[in-house]
Amino acid sequence: QVQLVESGGGLVQAGGSLRLSCAASGRAFSRYAMGWFRQAPGKEREFVAAISWSSVNIYYVDSVKGRFTISRDNAKNTVYLQMNSLKPEDTAVYYCASTGVVADLTDKSQYDYWGQGTQVTVSS
């Protein structure tokens, strides 16, 4: 059984920054790719960023490129999402997820374990 626990969400003004963390336990973290997704009220869960087990391959949705940075520390079994220049449209519940499949890290159906989510609210 894999457990993923997100933290770091909160309320921030537009232009501000937050750093999300996702702590993993239960299986060899370093062998699995990790992703961040988000879901705003009334919308589908969407891909935000993903990182391969080695950190060689990193992907972002276009709307966050240049503002968000995903990283991981395999020694700490943790993946991070640094979010800068936040906008009101970034408001959502943010989820981390893990997968052993590497075909398409932007596809949420490829992920088999999910965290409970952390709320990010950006005020204008």
Image (cartoon, grey):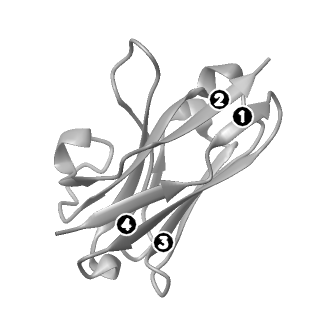
Which of the pair 96/70 is nearer the observer?
A: 96
| Measured Cα–Cα span from mark 4 to mark 2 | 27 Å
Mark 4: give few (<14), some (14-19) or many (20+) Cα within 10 Å: many
Residue sitting at the far top: 42
- In the rendered view, would you say 106 is above or below 54? above
Asked whether the beta carbons under mark 4 and mark 3 sit within 8 Å of each other, the answer is no
Residue appearing at x 69%, y 43% in the figure: 66
- Mark 1 or mark 4: whose residue is earlier in sequence: 1
Residue 52, labelled with which disc?
4
Q: Nearer the viewer, mark 1 or mark 4?
A: 1
Asked whether the beta carbons under mark 1 and mark 3 sit within 8 Å of each other, the answer is no
Which residue is labeled 3 in the image? 78
| Measured Cα–Cα span from mark 4 to mark 3 | 13 Å
Mark 3: give few (<14), some (14-19) or many (20+) Cα within 10 Å: many
Residue appearing at x 48%, y 34% in the figure: 93
Residue sitting at the far bottom: 75
Which residue is labeled 1 in the image? 11
Residue appearing at x 48%, y 72% in the figure: 78
- In the rendered view, would you say 50 is above or below 32? above
Specify the amino acid type for callout 4. Ser
Residue 54 position, x and y percent, is 40, 77
Q: Nearer the viewer, mark 3 or mark 2?
A: 2
Q: Quadrant of the N terminus?
A: bottom left
- Mark 1 or mark 3: whose residue is earlier in sequence: 1
| Measured Cα–Cα span from mark 1 to mark 4 | 29 Å
- Mark 4 or mark 2: whose residue is earlier in sequence: 4
Mark 2: give few (<14), some (14-19) or many (20+) Cα within 10 Å: many
Asked whether the beta carbons under mark 2 and mark 1 sit within 8 Å of each other, the answer is yes
Which of the pair 9/98 is nearer the observer?
A: 9
Specify the amino acid type for callout 3. Thr
Q: Nearer the viewer, mark 4 or mark 2?
A: 2
Which residue is labeled 2 in the image? 121
